[in-house]
């Protein structure tokens, strides 16, 4: 199982929007609506931000949104805030009860 | 409050074994898929294994098949990961997670270091 491809970094100024891509194949991202996104601060456990492509768990601000087109999923953070500076990982179901994570993206708030 | 607390990590020599445990509370343990996700130092996340609520099905990433074994004790609200034939590349923080396709919450993680 190869890791899903994410850009190593992304940045934006406070109040702006940033979009992170997550590219897989038809055997994972493109084949199923089981894409999730996680936020991770240094030294901390990841936190679920988006599940099943575009659903938000209770307590996650609506500034965070997810979408998918073909083999690429995306996470958009609107109205960027200082506390959004973190690492973000996507994950997807990859058939035969296997799962794969993305390579991770470091988001910097300028 | 849903909580997952891992234990059992430590330093082990290559070829050695270690058993991780995860104590769960705050939810109906026997109703949920559970799993393990690891993160090597400075690296990304990697799904390792998961187990069905009744323990009847278990799945693993290719790199640990035949070496790692996931199990659960629903009477004790506990999840386990038996790790044998450990390699340097197994060095990572191991997280216990609740869920099948998405994980909420995560435990705090336990560090496994494989080194001579």
Image (spheres, grey):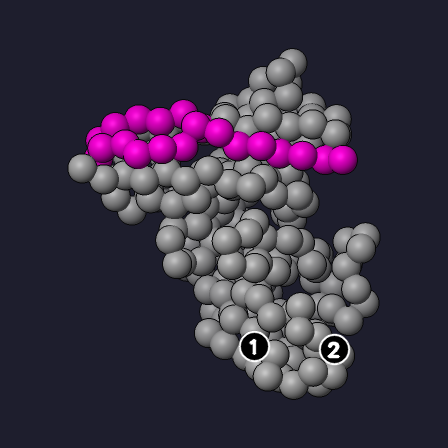
Decide if residue A63 is on the left or right side of residue B111: right
Placement of B84 over or under B41, stated as above or below = above
Q: Is residue B69 visible?
A: no
Residue B40 included in the magenta stretch of the image:
no
- Rendering coords of residue A47 (x, y %): 64, 53
Percent coordinates x, y for residue B110 in the rendering: 46, 38
Determine the residue located farthest toward the top in the rendered image.
B75
Quadrant of the snapshot with the C terminus of chain B: top left
Q: Is residue B44 above or below residue B47?
A: below
Please determine whether, in this image, residue A26 is positioned above or below residue B4.
below
Tags 2 and 1 touching, CB below 8 Å: no
Q: Which dot, 2 or 1, sits closer to the camera?
A: 1
Q: Residue at x 60, y 70 (%)?
A: A85
> Viewed as shown, does residue A53 lie left or right of B97?
right
| Label 2 Cα neighbours within 10 Å, binned few <14 / some 14-19 / many ≥20 | some
Q: Which residues are magenta?
A: B1-20
Label 2 and label 1 in one chain: yes
The residue that label 1 is drawn on is A108
Above or below residue B69? Residue B46 is: below
Provide the residue designation for mark 2: A78
* B7, B72: nearer the viewer: B7
């Amino acid at each position: 199982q190869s890791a899903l491809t994410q850009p190593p970094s992304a940045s934006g100024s406070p109040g702006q929007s940033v979009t992170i891509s997550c590219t897989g194949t038809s055997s994972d991202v493109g084949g199923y609506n089981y894409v999730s996104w996680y936020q991770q601060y240094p030294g901390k456990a990841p936190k679920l931000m988006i599940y099943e492509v575009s659903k938000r768990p209770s307590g996650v601000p609506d500034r965070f949104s997810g979408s998918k087109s073909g083999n690429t999923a995306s996470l958009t953070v609107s109205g960027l805030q200082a506390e959004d500076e973190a690492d973000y990982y996507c994950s997807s179901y990859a058939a035969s009860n296997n799962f794969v994570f993305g390579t991770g993206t470091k988001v910097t708030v300028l | 409050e849903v909580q997952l607390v891992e234990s059992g990590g430590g330093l082990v020599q290559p070829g050695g074994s270690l058993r991780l445990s995860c104590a769960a509370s705050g939810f109906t343990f026997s109703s949920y898929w559970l799993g393990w996700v690891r993160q090597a130092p400075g690296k990304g996340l990697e799904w390792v294994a998961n187990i069905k609520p009744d323990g009847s099905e278990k799945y693993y990433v290719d790199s640990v098949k035949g070496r790692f074994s996931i199990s659960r004790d629903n009477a004790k609200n506990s999840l386990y990961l038996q790790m044998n034939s450990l390699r340097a590349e197994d060095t990572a923080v191991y997280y216990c997670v609740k869920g099948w396709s998405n994980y909420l919450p995560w435990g705090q993680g336990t560090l496994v270091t494989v080194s001579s």
